Amino acid sequence: MTTQSGESLPEVRGTIDVPNHNGFWKNWRAFTGPALLVSVGYMDPGNWATSLTAGAEFKYLLLWVVALSSLMAIVLQICAAKLGIVTGKDLARASRDFAPKWTRWPNWISTELAIGACDLAEVLGSAVAIHLLFPRISIMIGVLITAFDVLLLMGLQQLGFRKIESLIFVLIATIAGCYFIELFVIGRAYHDFAEMGHAMIRPSFGGNSRALFIAIGIIGATVMPHNLYLHSAIVQTRKYQRDEPSIRRAIRFNAIDSAVALSLAFLVNASILVLAATTFHGQENLTLSDGRPIGDDWIQGAYHTLAPLLGTTAASVLFAIALLASGQSSTVTGTLAGQIVMEGFMSWKLRPWLRRLITRMLTIIPAVLVIGFYGDDEVTNLLNISQVILGIQLPFAMIPLMYFTSRRKYMGRYVNSRFLQFAGWSCVAVITALDIYLLIESTTR
């Protein structure tokens, strides 16, 4: 390990050229990419667990939470991109340089815990997908296999950052394509779009504390704290001039990139919930292939029951392929976020493959212990808990982000508009209030 004084990810900063003119499509193509990588975190296995659970247990009731969390994500990711473009610092580096020194260690530790929780979801999601595609491989063995996906990252790093973005696009297209086929090609369930629309515009928990728990999990799985650090860093892979027109152009096109990529993530998450709602809600006596009841394990349950319910084995295979693509794409962005946080907060620099290996080993230990002690039935519950941890950690990333981007001292003439300040601080207030409520409910039961 070495100490370094430069910015995070120095090996890819300014490596992608952008045009020096105002042609919309050429600029959009050049700037498109960072938000796509960020959007991966909004459709990772943790999202699958919370959205499947929400749809299966409450039908469309929590669809408004998916929509609201996606809007929150767009607002916050736009602010994160602005911070990186204007200051040339990612959120971790800005927190180190602008915030009181005593906050450095608590912020770093809490962010590492959030990244660990996210990585846990990726480990379990990938392991489950491997088990579903190859039943002879147990989930426990699948967890151990995921330790070697560090080799994937090592290979990707040799290709350049643009190639990484292209691969992520292919994986996201795989996920979206699988769900489109399941919902509209082979799906036989009736989609009540009027009921869906009503659920999206009428917030409610149905008086159910379990629904609130899952709602916070959805928010934690969607508005992920490490993505704020990641986005503020990878926007700096673009090589643009530091004059005012160039900076404003970068802000504009990164905002468009964020809105488009995260809208796609919303459609994927909504599709997962809708598939669960139309296929599993109200179904009784659903079992896994070995005859055991599904219980809370909706990821494995979805795989084993989609084929008979939709009338084709292709449904289950597509589900597993999409899940594996989700876990592996999240692996790449999780590694980058971990590197950014360590280099930003602590000025420590580890080789990315070593950083990934350490993080993955620390994640595998609790996964192996839980699965070994409780069995495969607790996988979905473990995924849901990991997403709640992310939701609770969110304010520690959101508050510094909104503070920095709302202060002219740091942003100059590019300070957040009043509308963006109102929207951003409203996100902070809503998520923090839900977190506090969850903690009170948990301690008073």
Image: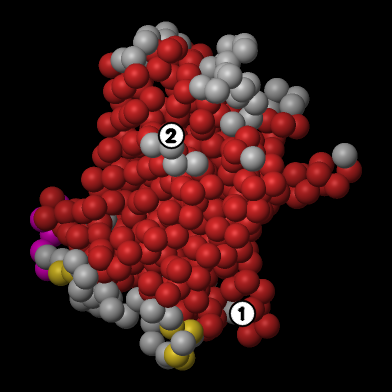
Assign a secondary structure to mark 2: loop
Of residues 380 and 160, which is closer to you in this image? Answer: 380
Q: Quadrant of residue 298?
A: top right
Q: Position of residue 440 (x, y in %)?
A: 82, 46
Is 212 situated above or below 190? below
Q: Quadrant of residue 160?
A: bottom left
Of the 4 image quadrants, the one containing the C terminus is top right
Q: Is residue 419 visible?
A: no
Label 2 to label 1: alpha-carbon separation: 45 Å
Query: Which amino acid type is shown beneath numbered disc 1?
Result: Arg
Quick check: is 23 in the magenta stretch?
yes
Quick check: is 227 in the magenta stretch?
no
Is 350 situated above or below 57? below
**Residue 310: mark:** none
Of residues 58 and 157, which is closer to you in this image? Answer: 157
**Residue 104: mark:** 1
Is 205 situated above or below 191? below
- Residue 390 horizontal side relative to residue 439, left or right: left
Residue annotated with mark 2:
135
